[in-house]
Image (cartoon, grey):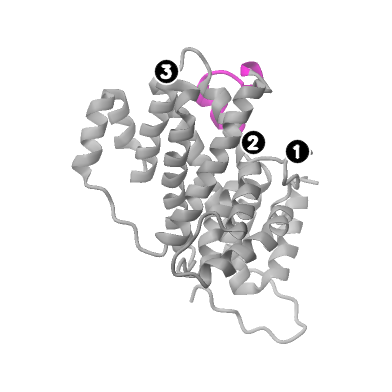
C-alpha cells in the first residue's frame, strides 16, 4: 500500500526495490539537471544566451514583483482550495476560448495532455501578444494553473493535501525550477539543500495555516515563505520573459513558451513527489543515501 512503511529489522540496511530505485534515478536526473533553458530555447527558436543573459533593471524589478505576487496567489490557492478535488472545466468552454484565439491554438489544445496545460497555453498566448505589460496579470494565472496540475501529480503520488504542509509542498515545487545565485535569497542548488533551506519557513507557514479557519495572506509566516519561493521562482520567470521577448514570437510563440514552462514544472513535480513517496515508504535517510549515490553516478557534484 502506498505510504506504508516497510517492516525492516532495527539496524538493518534498507534497500529500495528495483522499480523504486529506477523511479528515484529518473527523479534525480530531473531535479539535478533542470532542462528549462533548453525547453525555452526550443520554443523561442533561439538559444537563451543569444536572447540575452541579463534583463534590464526595470524588467528585473517587474519580474521580481510579479513572482512575489504569483507566489502569494499560489499560497492562497494551495491552502484554501487544493484539498478539494478539482472540477474539470466544460469542454465547450475550452473550445470557445480556443476558437477566439485561433486555429493554431485550437490544435495545441487538442494535443495538450491536460486542461491545465491548455489554459496555460492560452495565458502564454496573451503574454506573448502583449509582452511585459501583462506579466503581473498573466503570471499569477499561469502559476495557479500550474499549481493545480502539480496538485494532481501530488495526489497521484499519495499526498494528502488536506494537510497544510503537504499542500505547501506543491508550492515548494516552484523553488525547484532553477539554479540559485549569490544575489538570491535562496542560493542553494541541490534538491535536498533547497528543501533544507525552506524547511523552517515552510513548517511555520503550515503551522499557521493549520490553526486558522480564515487565512490572512499578510501573516508574517506566509509572507516569509512566499518571499523565499519567489526569490528562486523569479530566476526561471526571467528566463521565460527573455524567451518571450523574441520579436517574432507573438501570441503563438508565447503559447509555446508557456507550454515549455508548464512541462518543466510538471516534470519537477513528478520527481519531487516521487522522492517524498519513497521517503514515506523507506524513511528519509535511506532515500537520501540512495539519492546521493544516483547523483554521484550521474557525475553531479
Query: 97 or 276: nearer the eye?
Result: 97
**Mark on residue 235?**
2
Q: Are marks 2 and 3 in contact (CB under 8 Å)?
A: no
Query: 268 or 14: nearer the eye?
Result: 268
Considering only order in the chain, which callout, 1 or 3, is on the residue closer to the N terminus? Answer: 1
**Mark on residue 259?**
none
Q: Are marks 1 and 2 in contact (CB under 8 Å)?
A: yes
Q: Position of residue 202 (x, y in %)?
A: 63, 61
Residue tagged by mark 1? 181
Query: 229 or 179: nearer the eye?
Result: 229
Position of 68 relative to 21 (above/below): above
Considering only order in the chain, which callout, 3 or 2, is on the residue closer to the N terminus? Answer: 2
Residue at the far left: name it.
Answer: 92
Tell me how far mark 1 sits from mark 2, CA to CA.
Answer: 9 Å
Tell me how far mark 2 sits from mark 3, CA to CA.
Answer: 22 Å
Label 2: how many residues lie within 10 Å, few (<14), some (14-19) or many (20+)?
A: many
Using residue 3 as the reference point, say whether residue 13 is left or right of it: right
Q: Main secondary structure of the magenta part?
A: helix
**In this orientation, does residue 36 appear?**
no
Label 3: how many residues lie within 10 Å, few (<14), some (14-19) or many (20+)?
A: some
Query: 164 or 300: nearer the eye?
Result: 164
49 in magenta: yes
Considering only order in the chain, which callout, 2 or 1, is on the residue closer to the N terminus? Answer: 1
Tell me how far mark 3 sits from mark 1, CA to CA.
Answer: 31 Å
Q: Which residues are drawn in magenta? A: 37-51
Position of 68 relative to 121 (above/below): below
Q: Position of residue 106 (x, y in %)?
A: 28, 30
Label 1: how many residues lie within 10 Å, few (<14), some (14-19) or many (20+)?
A: few
**Mark on residue 250?**
3
Residue visible at 42% across and 21% down? Answer: 130
Q: Position of residue 168 (x, y in %)?
A: 54, 59
Amino acid at each position: 500500500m502506498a505510504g506504508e512503511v516497510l517492516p525492516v529489522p532495527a539496524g538493518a540496511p534498507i534497500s529500495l526495490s528495483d522499480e523504486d530505485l529506477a523511479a528515484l534515478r529518473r527523479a534525480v536526473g530531473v531535479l539535478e539537471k533542470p532542462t528549462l533553458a533548453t525547453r525555452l530555447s526550443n520554443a523561442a527558436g533561439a538559444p537563451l544566451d543569444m536572447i540575452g543573459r541579463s534583463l534590464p533593471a526595470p524588467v528585473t524589478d517587474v519580474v521580481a514583483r510579479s513572482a512575489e505576487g504569483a507566489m502569494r496567489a499560489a499560497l492562497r490557492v494551495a491552502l484554501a482550495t487544493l484539498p478539494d478535488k478539482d472540477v474539470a472545466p466544460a469542454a465547450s468552454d475550452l473550445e470557445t476560448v480556443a476558437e477566439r484565439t485561433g486555429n493554431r491554438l485550437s490544435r495545441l489544445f487538442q494535443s495538450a495532455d491536460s486542461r491545465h496545460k491548455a489554459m496555460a497555453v492560452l495565458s502564454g498566448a496573451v503574454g506573448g501578444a502583449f509582452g511585459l505589460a501583462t506579466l503581473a496579470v498573466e503570471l499569477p494565472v499561469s502559476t495557479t494553473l500550474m499549481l493545480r496540475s502539480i496538485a494532481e501529480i501530488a495526489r497521484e503520488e499519495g499526498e494528502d493535501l488536506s494537510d497544510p504542509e503537504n499542500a505547501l509542498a506543491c508550492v515548494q515545487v516552484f523553488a525547484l525550477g532553477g539554479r540559485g545565485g549569490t544575489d538570491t535569497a535562496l542560493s542553494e542548488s541541490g534538491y535536498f539543500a533547497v528543501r533544507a533551506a525552506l524547511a523552517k519557513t515552510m513548517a511555520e507557514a503550515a503551522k499557521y495555516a493549520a490553526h486558522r479557519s480564515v487565512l490572512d495572506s499578510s501573516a508574517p509566516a506566509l509572507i516569509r515563505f512566499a518571499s523565499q519561493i519567489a526569490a528562486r521562482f523569479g530566476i526561471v520567470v526571467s528566463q521565460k520573459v527573455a524567451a518571450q521577448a523574441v520579436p517574432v514570437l507573438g501570441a503563438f510563440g508565447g503559447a509555446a513558451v508557456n507550454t515549455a514552462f508548464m512541462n518543466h514544472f510538471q516534470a519537477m513535480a513528478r520527481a519531487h513527489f516521487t522522492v517524498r513517496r519513497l521517503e514515506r515508504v523507506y524513511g528519509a535517510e535511506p532515500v537520501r543515501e540512495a539519492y546521493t549515490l544516483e547523483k554521484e553516478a550521474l557525475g553531479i557534484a
